[in-house]
Amino acid sequence: MFKALGLTFDARLMGDDLADYLELVLAPLRAPAGIEAAHRFSVVDEGERYQRRYAVYFDGLPIVRTPSEPLALVYLLWHLNRAVVEASNDWLLLHAAAAEHDGSAVLLPARMDAGKSTLVAGLALRGFGYLTDEAVAIDPASARVDPYPKPLSIEMGSWDALAPLRPQLDARFARFCDDVWHVVPDAIRPGAVAESCTARAIVSPRFEPGATTALEPISRAEAVMMLAENAFNFSAHGAAGLDLLAGVVRPCECYRLTVGTLDDACDRVIDVVARLGARV
């Protein structure tokens, strides 16, 4: 049984390998005892007579049929993120990654394929705490960032830069990592998941192959608009959502980051954090 923000769920999977692998990668989301699952994911193998033999379901409704177990896993994890967003309107959810340093959050808002997961993974390797690589959850009551510690999704293009995170798995799980690594935070180091904290920096990354890594300050007003544009459920919070974002941004230093190499990008974020420490 698992809990991810407002979503409680379990999974019923045909095939011991897939079931055991999913249990492994979702370990950070395991729910405390006594919580009941409101939803269920299922993967059913309908046999060799079907070309698309693996059927993925959510609450008994079909999501997709696919010819392979690894693809079924990809669709299940994709739909899991979607279901978490739909079930978690108690939070204002931003399309962003987030890392923690000395009790403060660094938000990394950006659109798809901008390099959020790669950057937050690099920061975690440098000792930062991990909050999420996909959906930053802002608690409206406190304006704090609550962790959503899903497994980091590291795509093939980032494997060289993040070679220390190559999963060390039982051979029966190898096929589930052919195209993407699902990295559990504790595989980076034990206790890598950070606790709820207040944002003090916003750095919007954009990966540009061959570019020179560069950090550009932006105004807080621009940062508020950027977060609103990258919010999953901004409309659900109305005017209060805009006030909440303004409150989140107010204590923050705000930047855009052009990412040429991961090492240089991590160095720039560490520079930002060092300036925050000096200011305090």
Image (cartoon, rainbow, N blue to C red):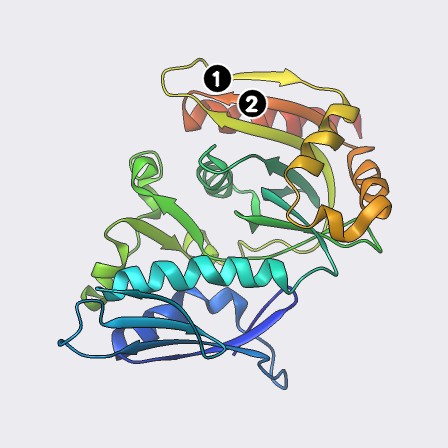
Going 73% across and 24% down the picture, which residue do you hit?
222
Q: Position of residue 199 (x, y in %)?
A: 73, 41
Name, please, the residue furthest toward the top: 212
Q: Is residue 47 above or below residue 230?
A: below
**Residue 169 seen from this side:** no
**Which disc is residue 257 wearing?**
2
Residue at the disc numbered 1: 213
- Number of marks: 2
| Residue 18 image position (x, y, % from top left) | 30, 72
Report whether 263 appears left or right of 158: right
Occupied quadrant, residue 24: bottom left
| Badge 1 density bin: few <14, some 14–19, many ≥20, Cα 10 Å | many
The residue tagged with tag 2: helix, strand or loop?
A: strand
Q: Are marks 2 and 1 in contact (CB under 8 Å)?
A: yes
Most foreground residue, 6 or 75: 75
Residue 75, located in which quarter of the rendered image?
bottom left
Query: The residue under label 1 is which amino acid type?
Result: Thr
Could you tell me residue 122's position as x and y percent? 46, 37
Query: Above or below — where is 157 with respect to 81?
Result: above
At x 32%, y 49%, the residue is 180
